[in-house]
Amino acid sequence: MRVNVLVSGQVQGVGFRWSTCRAARELGVAGWVRNLPDGRVEAEVEGDRDAVDRAVAWLEHGPSTAAVTGTHVSEVPATGESGFDQR
């Protein structure tokens, strides 16, 4: 499965993308993460349902330096992507 996650709050300039990549690799999910011009972070996460659910749970709080105020999760078509990158 694959999901798109939009993360709001104090999530830029706090190591969010780097920490997301590290967490994603530890959880064994594929995808990417990037900053958006409006201050949010966007991520796409792909893998088995349990791993994706754990990654989404991590994105809901992020690293200790972040202050997540909200997330919006939507399922998107899986691409078969491997690895996890910052964009």
Image: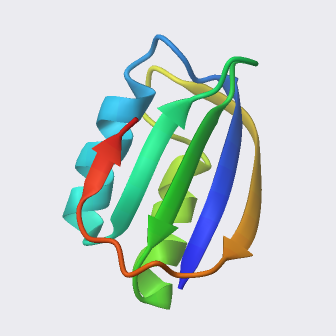
Q: Residue at the far front: name it.
A: 79
Q: Is residue 38 left or right of residue 34?
A: right
Q: Is residue 12 above or below residue 78?
A: above
Location of residue 19 (image quadrant): top left
Location of residue 31 (image quadrant): bottom left
Q: Percent position (x, y) of residue 52?
A: 48, 75
Foreground pick, 14 / 29: 29
Report the label total.
0
Foreground pick, 21 / 77: 77
Q: Is residue 14 above or below residue 23?
A: above
Q: Residue at the far top: name it.
A: 13
Q: Is residue 22 left or right of residue 1?
A: left
Q: How is the image coloured?
A: rainbow
Q: Percent position (x, y) of residue 80?
A: 37, 81
Image point 50% across, 88% down: which residue?
49
Image point 73% across, 62% down: which residue?
73
Image point 45% across, 20% down: which residue?
65
Q: Percent position (x, y) of residue 83?
A: 23, 62
Q: Is residue 53 above or below residue 4?
A: below
Q: Is residue 58 left or right of residue 75?
A: left
Q: Percent position (x, y) of residue 55?
A: 46, 63
Image point 64% across, 26% down: which residue?
36
In the rendered image, the quadrant that contains the C terminus is top left
